[in-house]
Amino acid sequence: MSKPDTFKKDLSQRLLSRLEPWRGAAGWRIAFSGGLDSTVLLHLLAELARHQRLPPLTAIHVHHGLQAVAASWPGHCRQMCQILGVPLQVIDVQVRSGASLEQAARDARYTAFEQTLLAGEVLLTAQHRDDQAETLMFRLLRGAGVKGLAAMPSHRVLGKGQVFRPLLDEPRALLERYAQEEGLSWIEDPSNKDSRFSRNYLRNHVLPMLTARWPQATASMVRSAAHLAEAQGLLDELATQDLALADTPCPWPWLAVPSLELAPLEELSSARQRNALRYWLSPLTRLPDSDHWAGWDSLRDAGPDGRPIWRLADGQLHRAEGRIWWLSGIWLKDVAGSQHWSTASQPLHLPGNGMLHILGDIPRGGLHVHYRQGGEVLDVPDRGRRDLKRLLNEKGVPVFLRGRLPLLYRGEQLLAVANLPGLDADPRGDWRLHWQPPTNDHSLR
């Protein structure tokens, strides 16, 4: 066993080496629960800051208030941060009730972190090697795929910043030794002993049995997670290549809805289709489990006259006009009604449907904006009166878009359909009807 001074120096040097890529960050935020792991990380960083030029350090304590004893934890964290000279921010959160209290608490915690991080900042969290092995086993029992079994990544994007886990290669026993030798005090969360929680059961019962029989079990599981992370990286590269063939320009460049051309995807094997779609959908929605991928097969294989929809956790995948379209948020809400456009020289705000402009000379007369109800007729230059439904078919307008296209009327006369060339302007070209569709951050890649 190394001497105390050498042990501390070695751990500090390993930590500093892992943090080297992040030395230019705008700030380092430390997720500080007050428990053993985050206390060691905070202490190590505060010590390094005395001798190294580091980004500004700030600790963040997220207070869930899930148990009465937790009321004293912010005070403990303030005292520790005051001793170490590190500013502390305490954030109170509400944990939503649900099937998994563990997951709900984690979601609340990371939502708070995401909302707090500023551009260029890095959130440092104290997960260690034992946590990684526990995560791998937990996900294995849930039937996770390659990405899930890769366990926790060492770093990832979070909001405007990044999350980095600098202690992921260190065993918990080593952190405990450091805390004891430095005389640190930390919070012992009584809920960690409650084996009704799945992770606690693994931590308190299963992993000790495994390591008693196979002492290197934790290290081996972490090594397997690293192999799986590498495999996932290769799958991501393959997905990027496959999506490049399907990510063709949308026929409607003003339509900010994620979409892919279907034909290039159909040429891939089923496994490669799923791999590409997982990669494409992951920023947009929580992904379905294996049983629900049958929805993709149904959407892909629907007949040419079908209007299939694959409903996922955070939106819907539609198939139309040879493409698949991701709709979520405001795009899943219907629009209806009519509006009088009294000052057509000014943009018209369409509730739930963006903005409408008239570019050029304003047509005379009382103007109104409506949406499709069926049976509309439009005078088309050199073609006479034409049924609007037929015109939309000719233009290849997706079904989900047809009910949202603003229609400009003067009295009972349909003058124009926004944004559709040949239908969006008057015959002489004196004006054109331009629509800015609604934006939805959750539906954009």
Image: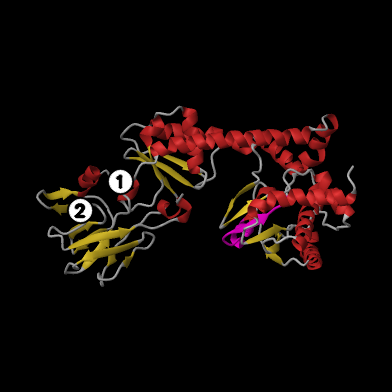
What is the three-letter code of the residue carrying label 1?
Answer: Pro
What is the three-letter code of the residue carrying label 2?
Answer: Leu
Alpha-carbon neighbours of circle 2 within 10 Å: few (<14), some, or many (≥20)? many
The answer to which of 239 and 290 lies nearer the viewer is 239
Quarter the N terminus occupies: top right
Q: Are marks 2 and 1 in contact (CB under 8 Å)?
A: no
- Residue 59: horizontal and vertical position, in percent? 71, 62
Viewed as shown, does residue 338 lie left or right of 186?
left
The answer to which of 422 and 13 lies nearer the viewer is 13
| Marks 2 and 1, how far apart at CA | 16 Å
Residue to which mark 2 is pinned: 423
Residue 118 sits inside the magenta stretch:
yes
> Hey, which residue is sitting farthest top in the picture?
269
The answer to which of 312 and 75 lies nearer the viewer is 75
The residue that appears at 51% across and 47% down in the rendered structure is 283
Residue range of the region highlighted in magenta in the rendering = 111-126
The secondary structure type at the circle numbered 1 is loop
Alpha-carbon neighbours of circle 1 within 10 Å: few (<14), some, or many (≥20)? few
